[in-house]
Image: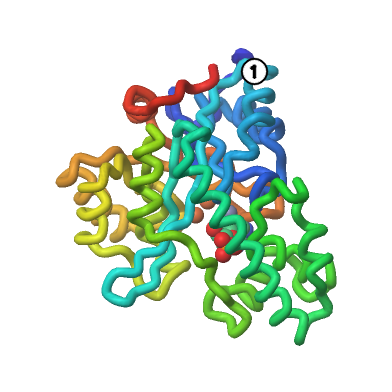
Amino acid sequence: MKNVPAMVGMPQGSWDLHCHTVYSDGTQTAEELIAQAQELGLAGVAITDHDTEKGWDDAIAAARRHRYPLICGSEIEGIERTGGRHISVHVLAWLYDRSNSAIRDLFAATQCERMKRAKRMTEALAKDYPITWEDVCAQAKRGGDTTVGRPHMADALVAAGCYPTRSDAFAGAVNYRSKYYIPVHSPDAETVISAVKAAGGVAGIAHAGSLERNDEILTDEDIERFAALGLDALEVYHRENPPAQRKRLLGLAQRLNLLVTGGSDWHGRGGKPNELGENTTDAATVAEIVRRAVMPIID
Ligand code: AMP
Ligand code: ZN
Ligand code: FE
Ligand code: FE
């Protein structure tokens, strides 16, 4: 690692375990992520693109070029459906074996569902806004290797002059409460957690206390059920978890013996306002994640 001074206030050994790149809805490459992380004095980063591992090879090459520590991972959507509910659950999956067939099948199914949903949602939007399916596809920075989602629809709306920024589109037409919204038909949350564990990975629930994404949030009982399946961690330190939720999640982590992580959910410049390293995970927790996982880190 280059000898750069640590950012003021950045504790030594801090990792950002939640970052998106151009392989999903991040606006920047892994190369840019790593260069910025190095400059900030972060100890390492994890790449966690939505529902894919296609960005790993580029990220590994960039980490080696920069001699910078990298954890390969993904953020995988599952749905909590018990009791007739519909809660989108984001599972952070670190250091799993990407050749595992259950994981490969899961990603293939989700990508297919995502394309169907993106086309249908774009058709609905196109009735009232001047965008086409081609416009949405043009926003996918890695072509067919990109996980396509609402951010690409938002970017198409921005390109068409309908909104000034992606976040404005998320406050409007692509919001989950908007009439154009269609959810992705993702697997059950339990299926995702079990698949990650079966593939030798370490699993955490991202932003479990966020009140901005679903009408309901996961209950203590839901998280207990996930812990019984082998869930490893809760992402307590995330900008969308309000203080009361952080307190609740910390209590749960202690009671259920779960690791506590933090991540910025970085999406690059213009992707989301989240700043790289704004929430982090300590070195001892990262060491425990690495100890539990089947895959080594790149360092
Ligand atoms: P989707 O999974 O297709 O429903 O899209 C939802 C995802 O959009 C969430 O996981 C967010 O991380 C992501 N996203 C990216 N940029 C933004 C933004 N500016 N505002 C809100 N969500 C965003
Ligand atoms: Zn995202
Ligand atoms: Fe997420
Ligand atoms: Fe994320």
Find residue 138 and report its horizontal and vertical position in percent: 82, 58
Q: Quadrant of residue 33?
A: top right
Q: Residue at x 64, y 68 (%)?
A: 116
Front residue of this view, candidates 132 and 277: 132
Quadrant of the drawing holding the C terminus: top right
Find residue 254 and report its horizontal and vertical position in percent: 19, 43
Front residue of this view, candidates 150 and 167: 150
The residue that mark 1 highlights is 64
In-image side of 116 versus 136 (left or right): left
Element marked by disc 1: helix
Front residue of this view, candidates 231 and 112: 112
Q: Residue at x 43, y 28 (%)?
A: 11
Above or below residue 5? Residue 175 is below
- Residue 208 visible in the snapshot: yes
Q: Residue at x 20, y 61 (%)?
A: 221
Find residue 257 and report its horizontal and vertical position in percent: 19, 40
